[in-house]
Amino acid sequence: MSQEITAATFDSVLATRELPVLVDFWAPWCGPCRALGPTLEQVAAEHADKVAVYKCNVDDEGDLAMRFNVVSIPTLILFKGGQPVLTMMGNQSKAALESQLLAAL
């Protein structure tokens, strides 16, 4: 299951997680974000041993979104070793999301 991440916790989460971290930059008013939510929760549950999934509300964490040049939501960014290694934008099917994510792990 995904957890919330904020600017205050972001760097410590990346530093302390042994697994790669996938961050979903989203907003509650965003239709594609809401559509992606259940798919992302399934992927998070099924691959909890491979990746930690977090959600970042861009309305609340605008500075964090700007830090990673998030200009469209939903945007998913995979971090390995604290560095972004994969960016996916827009709503994704489960198969497409898993394919890109697992290839990058």
Image: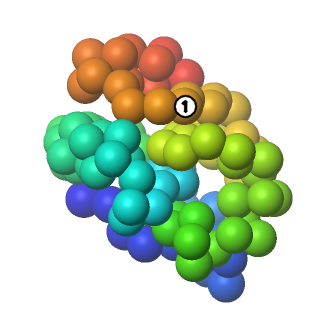
Which image quarter: residue 17?
Answer: bottom right
In this picture, residue 67 sits left or right of residue 53? right
In the image, residue 1 lies at what x, y percent? Answer: 25, 59
In this picture, residue 67 sits left or right of residue 33? right
Please say if 90 is above or below 34: above
Work out whether residue 85 or residue 70 is closer to the camera in this orientation and state it: 70
Work out whether residue 19 or residue 96 is closer to the camera in this orientation and state it: 96
Q: How many marks?
A: 1
Q: Residue furthest bottom?
A: 8
Work out whether residue 82 or residue 28 is closer to the camera in this orientation and state it: 28
Please say if 19 is above or below 87: below
Secondary structure beneath disc 1? Answer: strand
Q: Name the amino acid, label 1.
A: Met
Residue indicated by mark 1? 89
In the image, residue 65 lies at what x, y percent? Answer: 70, 59
Please say if 84 is above or below 25: above
In this picture, residue 71 sits left or right of residue 13? right
Q: How is the image coloured?
A: rainbow
Residue at image point 46% right, 18% down: 100
Q: Is residue 16 visible?
A: no
Residue at image point 62% right, 32% down: 87
In the image, residue 98 lies at what x, y percent? Answer: 34, 23
Residue at image point 29% right, 50% down: 34
In the image, residue 76 lies at what x, y percent? Answer: 53, 41
Which image quarter: residue 77?
Answer: top right
How packed mark 1 is, by other alpha carbons closer than 10 Å (few <14, some 14-19, many 20 or more), is some
Residue at image point 32% right, 60% down: 2
